[in-house]
């Protein structure tokens, strides 16, 4: 799993609901696969279930689960 800790001026870093939490002083994390940079179907009429990569999505869920359940 990749990770980035980026300043607010990085394009796309605020493309999620976590920004609203930051605005009010709450800690929040954005987990993204940056689909809009890699998937021409993202948020288009062609963005249908058969265009998604479920195997990789499952790997992300497993990785996030592992990270959260193994916090020290």
Image: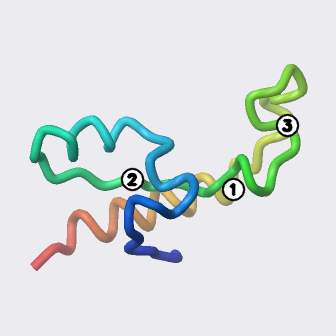
Query: Which circle, 1 or 2, is nearer the viewer?
Result: 2
Q: Tell me the distance, in whole angstroms, between the alpha carbons under discs 1 and 3.
A: 18 Å
Q: Tell me the distance, in whole angstroms, between the alpha carbons under discs 2 and 3.
A: 21 Å
**Furthest-top residue in this view:** 45
Say whether disc 2 or disc 3 marks the residue closer to the N-terminus: 2
- Badge 3 marks a residue whose secondary structure is loop
- Badge 1 marks a residue whose secondary structure is helix
- Tell me the residue that label 3 is attached to: 41
* 60 displayed left or right of 44: left
- Tell me the residue that label 1 is attached to: 55
Task: Kindly identify the residue that appears in the image at 32 percent across and 42 percent down.
Answer: 19
Q: Residues within 10 Å of mark 2 (few under 14, many from 20)?
A: few
Query: Which circle, 1 or 3, is nearer the viewer?
Result: 3
- When the figure is inspected, residue 50 is found, relative to residue 68, above or below; the finding is above
The image quadrant where one finds the C terminus is bottom left
* 53 displayed left or right of 68: right
Q: Are marks 1 and 2 in contact (CB under 8 Å)?
A: no
- When the figure is inspected, residue 54 is found, relative to residue 55, above or below; the finding is above
Say whether disc 1 or disc 3 marks the residue closer to the N-terminus: 3
Which percent across, then down, holds residue 47?
A: 81, 29
- Tell me the residue that label 2 is attached to: 30
Which percent across, then down, holds residue 32?
A: 52, 54
Task: Kindly identify the residue that appears in the image at 10 percent across and 46 percent down.
Answer: 25
The numbered dot on residue 72 is none
* 35 displayed left or right of 1: right
Task: Kindly identify the residue that appears in the image at 44 percent across and 67 percent down.
Answer: 63
Q: Quadrant of residue 17?
A: top left
Which percent across, then down, holds residue 43?
A: 74, 29
* 47 displayed left or right of 12: right
């Amino acid at each position: 799993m990749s990770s980035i800790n980026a300043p607010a001026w990085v394009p796309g870093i605020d493309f999620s609901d976590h920004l609203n939490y930051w605005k009010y002083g709450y800690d929040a994390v954005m987990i993204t696969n940056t689909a809009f940079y890699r998937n021409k179907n993202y948020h288009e009429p062609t963005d249908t279930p058969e265009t998604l990569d479920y195997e990789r999505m499952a790997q992300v869920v497993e990785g996030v689960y592992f990270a959260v359940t193994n916090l020290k």
